[in-house]
Image: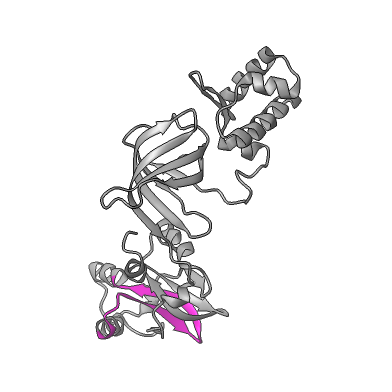
Amino acid sequence: MDLSLIQKDILITLITLYHRQSHSIKGEEIADVIHRNPGTVRNQMQALKAIGLVDGVPGPKGGYIPTALAYKELNLSLSEGDYDVPISRNGEVVKSVKVVEIDFTTLCHPDVCHAVIKLIGSAKIFEIGDQITIGPTPVNKLVIKGEVFGKDEAEQSLIISTTEMVSLPKMSIKNYMSSPLKTLRGLDTLHDALELFNRYRIHGAPVIEDDKLTGIVTMSDIATAVEMNLPLSTLVSEVMTTDVVEAPSDTKLFEVIRRFKEREIGRLIVVENGKPIGILTQSDIIRVFPAL
């Protein structure tokens, strides 16, 4: 979007004052800094509010706060680093809000763990009882789930009762994969695949030809073939999935978790120097991180 020079000036000043004072900023404060008429600033604020770059906070301590979209519009990071900590409400990511601080207030209580969540963006869009998820955070990959039971719109913060806190594993998938690979060849039959699955108690295996990955066969593929009245003498190459998801062995475990969900897959092949060396399944991940 194209902003006028005065709108950019107001927005930059708002962000600067907001970070310095950590509360909503009145139009008069901005006008004083940029030497403009307060009425002019208020008019421009309404325009900036209409396009989602600022939000108004009512009350004696009220004023204006920048939204996450304002930082993006000005190519500014939300903090000293470049990492945005997202927050989701009832399963949906709130794009106009980012988390900048988490303060645990009752860690020592045996039954309750409360936290104050400081936001960039407006707290008023959240309601008491909202189920929220925060993270992962940049350093320890912490993910926090909880319920909103209070908020401070003047300070742009939420008070949540945490229900779950986990730190996503940061080691590479090479540490969690199953290896050596149990593989099939393209000329193997569905009967051969079933024997392999039963022998090693697995539910899928890659198809390898000349050390190259050509596909993958799972129990679901075999079940589909049986439903289509295909004999067990059918070659696995005829029913295998050729679009196989791969990941380098040095990929961090938390990086592939989303890939499992987005692609709706049960396993992926771990490769090193272009050669398949292992397999990572949903069961492997659940053993490390049962909450997923």
Q: Is residue 178 magenta?
A: no
* 247 or 254, nearer to the observer: 254
Q: Can residue 36 be seen in the rendering of this structure?
A: yes
Which region is colored magenta?
A: 199-219
Q: Identify the image quadrant of residue 197.
A: bottom left
* 209 or 124, nearer to the observer: 124
Q: Please tell me which residue is depicted at 24% across the width and 82% down the height of the picture.
A: 198
Q: Is residue 217 magenta?
A: yes
The prevailing secondary structure element of the residues shown in magenta is: strand
Query: Does residue 169 sit above or below 102 in this rendering?
Result: below
Query: Does residue 289 sit above or below 210 in this rendering?
Result: above
In the picture, measured across the screen, residue 254 lies left or right of residue 66, that is left
Q: Please tell me which residue is depicted at 44% across the width and 77% down the height of the picture.
A: 175
Q: Quadrant of the C terminus?
A: bottom left
In the picture, measured across the screen, residue 44 lies left or right of residue 124, that is right
State the colouring used for the structure image.
Answer: one colour
Query: Does residue 161 sit above or below 52 in this rendering?
Result: below
Q: Please tell me which residue is depicted at 48% across the width and 67% down the height of the picture.
A: 170
Image position, residue 264 (x, y; %): 38, 59
Image position, residue 84 (x, y; %): 55, 48
Image position, residue 104 (x, y; %): 41, 48
Q: Can residue 90 be seen in the rendering of this structure?
A: no
Image position, residue 108 (x, y; %): 33, 52
